Amino acid sequence: MVCFQSEREAKEFGKVLDQRPGKFTLKIAKDKGRIIESGHTVWQKAQRQVKKVVIFEFLGSTHYGCRTEPFKVGRKTARKKFIEKMKQMNQWLTKVRNLAGLKE
């Protein structure tokens, strides 16, 4: 994930990024990369148009734009990962809960 001040800079970076992996015989999946607008102006525009701001999942975290000043990208554990870990923890607790004696 890379952040830029302007859309022009992001597009220039994208062009260079497309060429670079070719030197190492690598390829970048075109469908996985995209430019997402973020910032205070995007929040205000979304509120006026009664739309949601874009959020996305990356590396097990949900990324979203915070309404803080200055603007920053907020992260929280992805719902899918959280539910998976909670199920694993409940299975472990079920196995372990009766192993210790009452006095312990």
Image: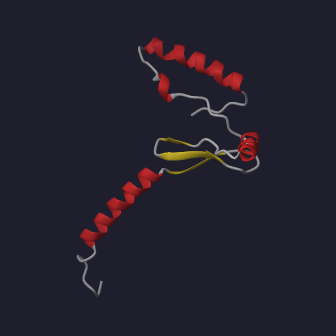
In this rendering, the answer to whether 82 lies above or below 45 is below
Task: Give residue 88's position: percent from left, percent from top.
Answer: 32, 59
Left or right position of 60 against 98? right
In which quadrant will I find the N terminus?
Answer: top right
Q: What is the basis of the colouring in this image?
A: secondary structure
Q: Quadrant of residue 52?
A: top right
Looking at this view, is 31 or 63 the one in front?
31
Task: Give residue 4's position: percent from left, percent from top.
Answer: 68, 30
Task: Give residue 33's position: percent from left, percent from top.
Answer: 53, 28
Q: Quadrant of residue 41?
A: top right
Left or right position of 67 against 84? right
Task: Give residue 36's position: percent from left, percent from top.
Answer: 62, 33
Q: Residue furthest front?
A: 49
Q: Quadrant of residue 96?
A: bottom left
Seen at 70% across and 47% down, the residue is: 50
In this rendering, the answer to whether 84 lies above or below 64 is below
Left or right position of 21 against 74? left
Seen at 27% across and 86% down, the residue is: 102
In this rendering, the answer to whether 14 lies above or below 104 is above
Seen at 31% across and 69% down, the residue is: 93
In which quadrant will I find the C terminus?
Answer: bottom left
Seen at 59% across and 21% down, the residue is: 14
Total numbered labels placed on residues in the image: 0
